[in-house]
Amino acid sequence: QRLGRNATPTEIAQELELEPAQIREYLSIARQPVSLDVRVGDNQDTELSDLLEDDGPTPIHFTTQESLRQDLDNLLAELSPQQREVLALRFGLEDGNELSLAKVGQRLNLSRERVRQLEHQALAHLRRRHGNVRDYIIAS
């Protein structure tokens, strides 16, 4: 860093009072991939993969989300195609982008008021059928 660039193996060797060949060997070892199945620890009883944290969803969470998605799809299937489209656009169910009543109206060639009515009808229907989804909300 002092030089404003990466140091060469010779410069590193001089700084650490080692041979440049040793530095090149250490650098080559550092670049070699390591298997996640390699055993580590004092007793070699732990695999390296066991020590890595998994930030992904747990299998239970993934299964619950998939089941919820399927139940929501079944509920939405009870709506008219127009109501489904309005909800999908308003709440970003397909692409994550939520649109205003006016934007949905423009896209579907409907008035803002008609979009509001369709949304209200669809949500009222879903509220009457919310028993299927309540279990997921409680579990979350």
Image (cartoon, rainbow, N blue to C red):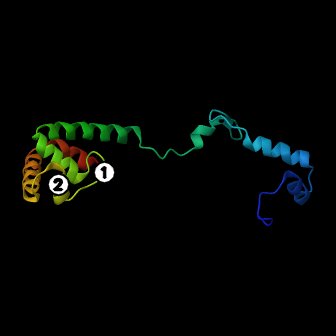
Q: Residue at x 73, y 42 (%)?
A: 31
Q: Residue at x 25, y 55 (%)?
A: 98
Secondary structure under tag 1 reads loop
Residue kind at label 1, given as amino acid type: Gly
Residue 66 spot, x, y in % from top left: 30, 38
| Relative to 122, 25 lies left or right | right
Residue 47 spot, x, y in % from top left: 62, 36
Question: How dense is the environment of label 1, judged by Cα within 10 Å: few (below 14), some, or many (20 and up)?
Answer: few
Q: Residue at x 27, y 37 (%)?
A: 67
Q: Nearer the viewer, mark 2 or mark 1?
A: 2
Closer to us: 18 or 96? 96
Q: Which mark is residue 96?
A: 1
The answer to whether residue 20 is visible is: yes
Q: Quadrant of the N terminus?
A: bottom right
Residue kind at label 2, given as amino acid type: Gln
CA distance separating discs 2 and 1:
18 Å
Counting labels gives 2
The answer to whether residue 130 is visible is: no
Q: Which mark is residue 136?
A: none
Residue 127 spot, x, y in % from top left: 11, 49
First in residue order: circle 2 vs circle 1: 1
Q: Is residue 9 above or below residue 45?
A: below
Residue 105 spot, x, y in % from top left: 14, 54
Secondary structure under tag 2 reads helix
Closer to us: 52 or 33? 33
Residues tagged 2 and 1 counted as in contact (Cβ below 8 A) = no
Q: Residue furthest bottom?
A: 2
Closer to us: 131 or 115? 115
- Which residue is label 2 attached to? 106
